[in-house]
Amino acid sequence: MEQTEQKTYIHNPFETKVCPKCGHKYDALQPKCPKCKEPFETSRALPFNEVTFTNPFIEIVLFFVGWLGVKGLVEIISRILKDMVLNGSLPASEANMTLNYAVYGVLFVIMMGITSIYLPKILKSFTKPDFLWGIIVYAVIFGFDIVWGTISSSLGATTNQNQEAINTITKINLPMSLLFLGFIGPICEELTYRVGLFNFTRRVNRIMGYILSAAIFGLIHIHDYGSLNEWLSYPTYLFAGLAFAFAYEKWGLGASALAHISNNVLSLLMVYFLSQPQ
């Protein structure tokens, strides 16, 4: 009697395989041996092999640095800025702005150090024409934001704390906001939640990768878990997290980063110019 192969849905994220030709051990998600280029017929490589350039240990580090590291940086820098505000050397209105710029600036330097050996592959993902699909992904996110914004407004939702802080910062200094919140911030978050969390969790299960990375990405934008108004904004971040993960999976880091950057930059520009007196 012919036996059918049982499909496995949960995998060991640290799984490796041995090349039958040269004996080299490598990541189980790679479709061929990185040493002799021998294809592996039973590979469980996923559709986005070209962006699977990290290993599971680096992915874990990127996630925890981008997630918990931000919390630590906020705590440390906040204390420094608090002292500066108290002694009068920094206006209180600029303290929050400086905090955001400093956190993203330090985080960006740390992440560039962690991914330094992968920089050629990271940069390559921005040179392929496919990365321009990020614009289409952003357009879909923008459309969803309009629809959900109408629904949430009818339920009494107002601007959430995260967006309110961004609006205030942007009105004070647009160029610096564009640099840190429009470009550096999205790159740090893509390295954290797509290259880090999504890559690692989809090693276990692809659907799990989508759900966890999008859910946690949404949660970091909620500042008060007891506020209904905050939760009414959650679907916009959740949908964006799913869309960024799809872009990353389908076309690579360049596409997800472009979608994320487009979303942030155009949002900042609208906030700034709509706030100007007529």
Image (spheres, rainbow, N blue to C red):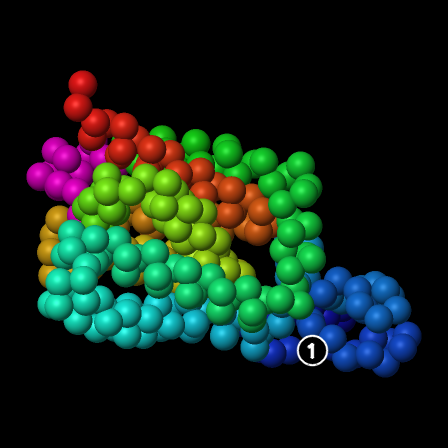
| Residue located 33% across and 33% down the image | 269
In the image: residue 169, left or right of residue 34: left
Inspect the image, locate mark 1, and give the three-letter code of the amino acid beneath it.
Answer: Thr
Q: Is residue 201 visible?
A: no
Asked if the magenta segment contains residue 94, the reply would be: no
* Residues shaded magenta: 148-161
219 above or below 256?
Answer: below
205 above or below 263?
Answer: below
Q: Which residue is mark 1?
A: 16
Q: Is residue 148 visible?
A: yes
Please, which residue is most extreme toward the top here?
Answer: 278
Residue 114: give x, y in percent of width and height.
Answer: 56, 71
Which of 258/12 is in front? 258
Category of crowding for the residue at label 1, using alpha-carbon neighbours closer than 10 angstroms: few (below 14), some (14–19), many (at least 20): few
| Quadrant position of residue 57 | bottom right
Residue 170: give x, y in percent of width and height.
Answer: 27, 42
Asked if the magenta segment contains residue 160, the reply would be: yes
| Residue located 17% across and 23% down the image | 277
Quarter of the figure with the N terminus? bottom right
Residue 215: give x, y in percent of width and height.
Answer: 35, 58
Quarter of the figure with the C terminus? top left
| Residue located 13% across and 41% down the image | 158
